[in-house]
Image (cartoon, rainbow, N blue to C red):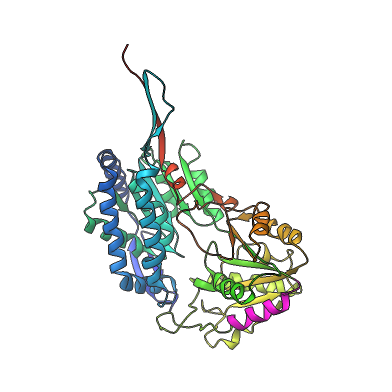
């Protein structure tokens, strides 16, 4: 098959049709990228920054139109999609542009008479960015902007659900005056991606997606000495201590669980609550969840749109049914939401109690508007349950006790630990994971280290 379709979850109609790149197009793209990088690496950081800032301005200026495209492609309500560009995308891009000079400067060795010694950070070459559909701009910007700021060229392959995002990037960089070949995109199938990774002109792979996808990336690059950044999702927990601000915790954890229909790698998928406040927490959580408006995401008053595919909704429903069969209780009748339809992507938010770790709903990634809530007797029990996972992307504790939060954080196996916050990427901090959540780093000064290689200069002065 030489083409693909993007089926809109709004109405199951074809929204985009595109052809896969031909062998000749792939070869041309790889060759142009390699040639362009030889020139681009000699530009100054200020020159790169000027272009990248114009790109950011393009996305902010066109946020409404791009947001509507995004809603059609993956179903997030239109009241939210523009903010992916005006808030998160802009914040991350501007931060990484601003710190590039400092992050990429030479590392000077201690003074030694008669010598000049330093480590230079050289760009890797061409970076292949493989971006997902769920936050198509937020995830891709983590790699694209710093890769270009570091002097690399970029080839972007976006998910087949969101191909217009790749094309929008090209428009933005072209308008900004980026030299030809520094940024390019390709529409590819899985086999083509594997072949490109094996090509000697690819120097780094930045992938966000599933564990299965991450293993496929590693297999494709097994014969090569290159690295990959693999952000592979999570089963992110929250622990609500008895001293937590109850209303604040409920408000933020409901949003953390159900925003984007729960389709977030760092969304809240399981919650542990101290038994002293368990009933009050659950009651408040259910009441707030029932206030969502599930429906057509093109309507301004819709706050919960469809999942990306019917198969995704059915997968989540299977987890729910398994949990109920093992004794779980679903506190929300999904049919109280008039748009809920088990034969469509429109899935109502659901809250389960009487859950335990024998159930997939508490151990396997759900990626849907579903959350399980368990009572715990102590911090120690909560820590054990939070760590009882194949994943380790983020975790959060909700408490008034900063010192205790730090003690708990030091015992949690996770890439990011929050107190009184969740489902957020701070561009000043390294975004990383442990266990099956992957490896590598984006954002922060550390994000530049994986996009460059050290080159040491040891210069003896005189004879």
Q: Is residue 198 magenta?
A: no
At 39% from the left and 19% from the top, the residue drawn is 113
Question: Can see residue 438?
Answer: yes
Dominant SS of magenta comes to helix
User: 277 or 415, which is in the foreground?
Assistant: 277
Q: Quadrant of the N terminus?
A: bottom left
- Left or right: 157 in relation to 176: right
Up/down of 30 relative to 166, above or below? above
Q: Is residue 277 magenta?
A: yes
Q: Position of residue 421 (x, y in %)?
A: 56, 65
User: 164 or 89, which is in the foreground?
Assistant: 89
Up/down of 332 relative to 124, above or below? below
At 73% from the left and 57% from the top, the residue drawn is 384
- Left or right: 157 in relation to 376: left
- Left or right: 108 in relation to 222: left
User: 195 or 385, which is in the foreground?
Assistant: 385
Magenta-colored span: 275-289
For this orientation, the residue located farthest to the right is 377
- Left or right: 375 in relation to 438: right
Q: Position of residue 378 (x, y in %)?
A: 76, 63
Q: Quadrant of residue 35?
A: top left
Q: Position of residue 156 (x, y in %)?
A: 36, 53
């Amino acid at each position: 098959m030489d083409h693909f379709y993007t089926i809109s979850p709004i109405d199951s109609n074809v929204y985009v049709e595109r052809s896969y790149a031909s062998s000749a197009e792939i070869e041309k793209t790889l060759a142009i990228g390699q040639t362009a990088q030889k020139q681009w690496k000699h530009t100054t950081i200020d020159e790169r920054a000027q272009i990248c800032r114009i790109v950011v301005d393009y996305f902010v200026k066109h946020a409404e139109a791009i947001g509507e495209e995004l809603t059609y492609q993956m179903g997030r309500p239109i009241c939210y999609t523009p903010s992916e560009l005006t808030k998160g995308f802009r914040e991350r891009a501007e931060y990484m542009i601003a710190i590039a000079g400092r992050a990429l400067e030479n590392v000077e060795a201690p003074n030694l008479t008669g010598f000049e010694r330093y480590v230079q950070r050289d760009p890797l070459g061409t970076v292949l960015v493989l971006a997902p559909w769920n936050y198509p701009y937020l995830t891709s910007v983590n790699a694209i902007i710093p890769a270009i700021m570091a002097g690399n060229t970029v080839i972007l392959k976006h998910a087949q659900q969101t191909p217009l995002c790749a094309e929008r990037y090209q428009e933005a960089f072209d308008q900004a005056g980026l030299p030809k070949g520094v940024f390019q995109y390709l529409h590819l199938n899985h086999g083509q991606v594997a072949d490109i990774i094996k090509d000697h002109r690819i120097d780094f792979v930045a992938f966000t997606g599933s564990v299965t996808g991450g293993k496929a990336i590693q297999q494709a690059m097994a014969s090569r000495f290159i690295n990959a950044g693999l952000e592979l999702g999570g089963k992110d927990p929250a622990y609500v201590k008895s001293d937590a601000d109850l209303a604040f915790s409920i408000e933020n954890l409901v949003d953390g669980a159900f925003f984007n229909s729960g389709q977030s790698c760092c969304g809240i998928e399981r919650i542990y609550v101290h038994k002293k406040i368990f009933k009050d927490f659950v009651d408040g959580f259910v009441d707030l969840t029932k206030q969502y408006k599930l429906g057509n995401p093109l309507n301004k008053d819709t706050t919960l749109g469809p999942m990306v595919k019917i198969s995704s909704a059915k997968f989540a429903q299977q987890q729910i049914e398994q949990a109920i069969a093992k004794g779980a209780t679903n506190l929300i009748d999904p049919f109280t939401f008039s748009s809920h339809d088990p034969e469509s992507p429109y899935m109502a938010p659901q809250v389960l109690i009487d859950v335990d770790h024998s159930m997939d709903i508490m151990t396997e990634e759900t990626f849907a508007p579903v959350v399980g809530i368990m009572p715990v007797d102590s911090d120690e029990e909560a820590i054990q349950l939070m760590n009882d996972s194949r994943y380790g992307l983020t975790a959060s504790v909700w408490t008034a006790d900063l010192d205790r939060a730090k003690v708990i954080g030091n015992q949690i196996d996770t890439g990011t630990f929050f107190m009184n916050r969740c489902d957020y990427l701070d561009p000043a901090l390294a975004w990383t994971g442990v266990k099956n959540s992957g490896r590598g780093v984006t954002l922060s000064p550390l994000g530049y280290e994986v996009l460059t290689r050290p080159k040491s200069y040891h210069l003896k002065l005189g004879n």
